[in-house]
Amino acid sequence: MDCRSAAHALSQIATLLELHDEDAAAVKAMQVAARITAALGERPLGEALKHELNPRDWPHPDLLSPEALAVLHELADHNSSTVLERLQEETPEGLMEMLRVPGLGPARIRSIHDGLHIDTLLELEQAAREGKLASLPKFGARTADKVLKGIADLRATGAYVLWQHGRAEAERVAEALRIQPDVLQLEIAGSIRRRNEIVRDVDLVAAVRGSPSIVAATLAQLRGVKEVLGGGGRTLQLRLDNGVRVDLACVRPEQFALALWRGTGSALHVTQVTERAASLGYTLTNDELRDADGALVAIPSEAALYEQLGMAFVPPEQREAAGEVEAAVADVLPALLEEHELRGALHCHSQYSDGAATIEQMARAAYARGLRYLGVSDHSQSNTYAGGLSRDRILEQHAEIDALNVAFAQEGLDFRVLKGIEADILPCGRMDYDAGFLDRFDFVIGSVHTRYGMNAEQMTNRVLKALDDPHLTILGHPTGRLLLTREPYAIHLDAILEKAARVGVAIELNADPHRLDIDWRACRIAAEKGAMVSIGPDAHSPQGFDNLELGVAVARKGWLRASNVLNTRSAAEVMAFAAARRAGAIGTAAGTVAGTAAARSGAALLRVI
């Protein structure tokens, strides 16, 4: 690691310390150390610690605090900092996202979080618009307006946002346009409709009454439109007052299906389907399909387009030019997972660790959503910053779960709470708790929460060793990424997926919108290798079950069937899956089912990922 990278880590620590209202002197110490270290540029940190950053050579050794020096030595030795990792894990992902807003520093974010219990960018914008932000002490209307401007400036740069935020903004704009008298039908298209993890623009397609170009010009004059960025005629690029960029296409009603298909993309998928049309003698231009004689072919729906071209219907999530066109022509696209096929949730936290609700509250919320089991998986003992559970607390929790299951049975509720744990995968690759204690759990999720700075070989070996533990049921958020705020750690994921399939460990698709880990590309590879995937909401409150919708969307984008997903099975089958792993019945049955499904999905077709 060079000194510039180390300085960046120190600056991050200072920011997060301030966000957590730590001692001002500690914050300043990290800031000073960051400035001193940054001045050394690309000099190797290890060399600098022997010379320029050695306190013995400093005329003012007190400038570098012992805490900052400890961080620097750890960065030099391990390429990571336990202090930084702890602070990142303790910080809600949404607060990290707020730090991207110009003019919104850690002290204000802390005040907002403490005063309004807000921890997402979307909630912040809503609070500012509704006057809640202005009501906070030392804020006022002027500060609220500055926050809104900062969010607008962030969007105006074309910065990406999480899918859930993009969809919420798209729905707000769509709702405002649908009530216009000349708009007959309007749908969200683009990357939001394809369920991309992060999005930038809002794409809308509208069927209108009268001339599309005249209606588009009229819509461009509506309140809330700041400027027209480009386009002309029936297609416009607009920037709204809040910085959101909107691509709006207005078409005649008979053109709507093709316009929606084209507006959904992806561009490469559209190109490949257009080439398919040309090979059959059709011309697909603008929003019209014509046969070899030039006659217009009516296309009342997207399904009708694919049928006309001799293809199976391609769901929007799959339209990424990743082999779906060839598979649709060969009619081997899989029957994709549907949300109603999920029977339980296996990654959920309670008040025992860092959750906001009791186990009973989480269980009843899961039941109300149609689920039939809840896998409680609070943090393990090594994860002290997230309230990791001691052995005594585990035993207390298990007694509560037993009592809840008895109560549910007496109520006639077809529901069960499973005893799980999210056990840290320690730097050595060992699972937290010993084998005898791990035997007490119905299932075990193993996750990396520390030492993200390991190189690819070290991290891969760490996780491969964890996969050897027969207690491990599910590998949690396998790349450690936080979308827009933390890159994945270095790891040879292909080797991990290969071994997970071989030994019968499920791979988690963590459905927290900030994670979506593994991503849709890896989902497809996992299925092709025969590994099961577990869609975990990572729910810390009843609202967290909403994450399952996006988790299913990502699974569909990754071509997963219900048979590829662990939590489409019953509670008894999940427990049997975990028990078979412990008994040494390596996951051949799971692998065979998933692998056969993948083969039927056209796994042998060329994949562009």
Image (cartoon, grey):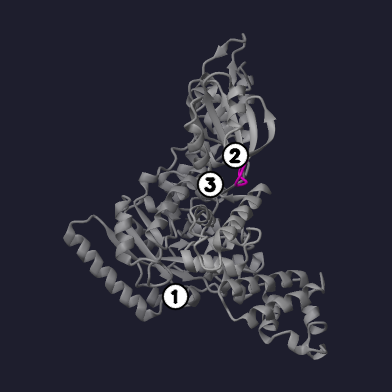
- Residue carrying label 3: 524
Q: Quadrant of the C terminus?
A: top right
Residue type at mark 3?
Arg
SS class of the residue under badge 2? loop
Judge by depth and name the residue closer to the eye, 411 or 443. Answer: 411
Report how far apart the C-alphas of labels 1 and 3 lie in the structure.
Answer: 33 Å
Mark 1, residue position = 388
Q: Foreground residue, 88 or 396?
A: 88
Query: What residue range appears in magenta?
Result: 240-246
Distance, label 3 to label 2, CA atoms, is 10 Å
The residue depicted at 56 percent of the width and 65 percent of the height is 109
Which quadrant is home to the N terminus? bottom right
Q: Earlier in the sequence, mark 3 or mark 2?
A: 2
Which of discs 1 and 2 lies nearer the camera? The answer is 1
Question: Which residue was labeled with disc 2?
Answer: 322
Location of residue 200 (image quadrant): top right
Q: How many marks?
A: 3
Q: Is residue 312 magenta?
A: no
Does the residue at mark 3 contact the one at mark 2 (Cβ under 8 Å)?
A: yes
Q: Quick check: can you spot residue 380? A: yes
Residue at x 60% of width, y 65% of height: 460
Whole-percent x, y for residue 428 in the image: 56, 75
